[in-house]
Amino acid sequence: MTPSDSRPAPETSTAPVLLVLGAGPGVGLAVAGLFAADGFTTVLACRLPEEAEPLAARLREQGFHAEGAGVDLHDPADVGRVVAEVGERYGRIDVLHFNPSIFREADPLQLSVAALIEDFTVGAAALLPAVQAARPFLADGARVLVTGSAAADKPWHRAASLGVQKAAVRNLVTSLDATLAPVGVRAVAVQVNGVLGEGAFTRDRVAAALHAAATRPVEGWTPHVSYDG
């Protein structure tokens, strides 16, 4: 990881830490802003550090502590390395937000196996090395938060790989939540049942739904929450 915030940071942090994988200027940044307002240190990880820096800078301009990082979500080793470095840097990860997805316009007769696997790796499988690397830094009360989509249930046939990604990552969240629950760590996927950017599905309203799902009381916890606008 190459942090884009050049200011020195302590090796351990008393402030809670949010790490966003697959951050962008939409939902990822909006979620980070909400947690930053809660007092979190935020780390936004994009494909390249130079993509992450403008996002982190926008939060720093508001007085928050934020840094950017580059991560190759196609590479499990790089995912694990970046997540572990964040954990080692701050001594904790309180919310791990998994936000990536790949939109590829190709129907099932056009979509190759190689392309499907490539998209699945980023949009679903990368969650595995991320959580595995984060586990030593996830204390009781930590959360794994995943951006889901209606494509899990109602895939658009002309973007077939997206539905596979979202159905798979939702299923994986179920297993992660059951595995982590005994140590007080919970996982949740928020299924966004609408088109991002339209009507009730603006980035800010979707981000608010994600934030609410991660910060709700543990009593009656479910690993799946729907946002219907």
Image (tube, grey):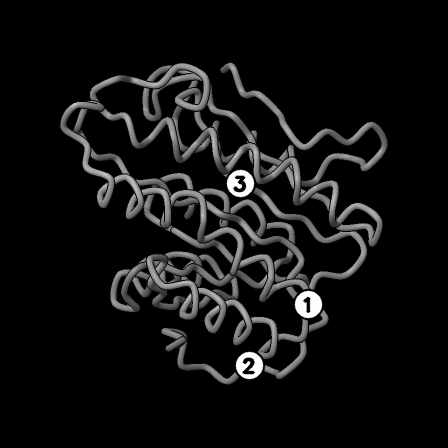
- SS at badge 1: helix
Badge 2 is on which residue? Answer: 9
Q: Where is residue 208 in the image (x, y as percent from the top left)?
A: 54, 32
- Circle 3 sits on which residue? 146
Q: Which residue is drawn at 44% across and 26% down?
A: 149
Element under label 3? Answer: strand
User: N-terminal of the two: label 3 or label 1?
Assistant: 1
Q: Are marks 3 and 2 in contact (CB under 8 Å)?
A: no
> Compared to 73, does 222 lie above or below?
above
Counting from the top left corner in percent of width and height, residue 219 is at: 85, 32
Crowd tier of the residue under label 2, counting other residues whose Cα lies within 10 Å: few below 14, some 14–19, many 20 or above: few
Left or right of residue 8, residue 38 in this image:
right
Give how far across and how far down residue 93 sits, in percent: 64, 63
Mark nearest the camera among 3 and 2 is 3
Circle number at residue 137 = 1
Residue 94 has which mark?
Answer: none
Give the spatial CA distance, label 3 vs label 2. Answer: 27 Å
Q: Where is residue 38 in the image (x, y as percent from the top left)?
A: 64, 50
Q: Which residue: 72% across, 71% down?
A: 14
Under mark 3, the amino acid is Val
- The residue type indicated by label 2 comes to Ala
Q: Is mark 2 on a helix, strand or loop?
A: loop
The residue at the point 66 percent across, 45 percent down is 176
| Mark found first going from the N terminus, 2 or 1 | 2
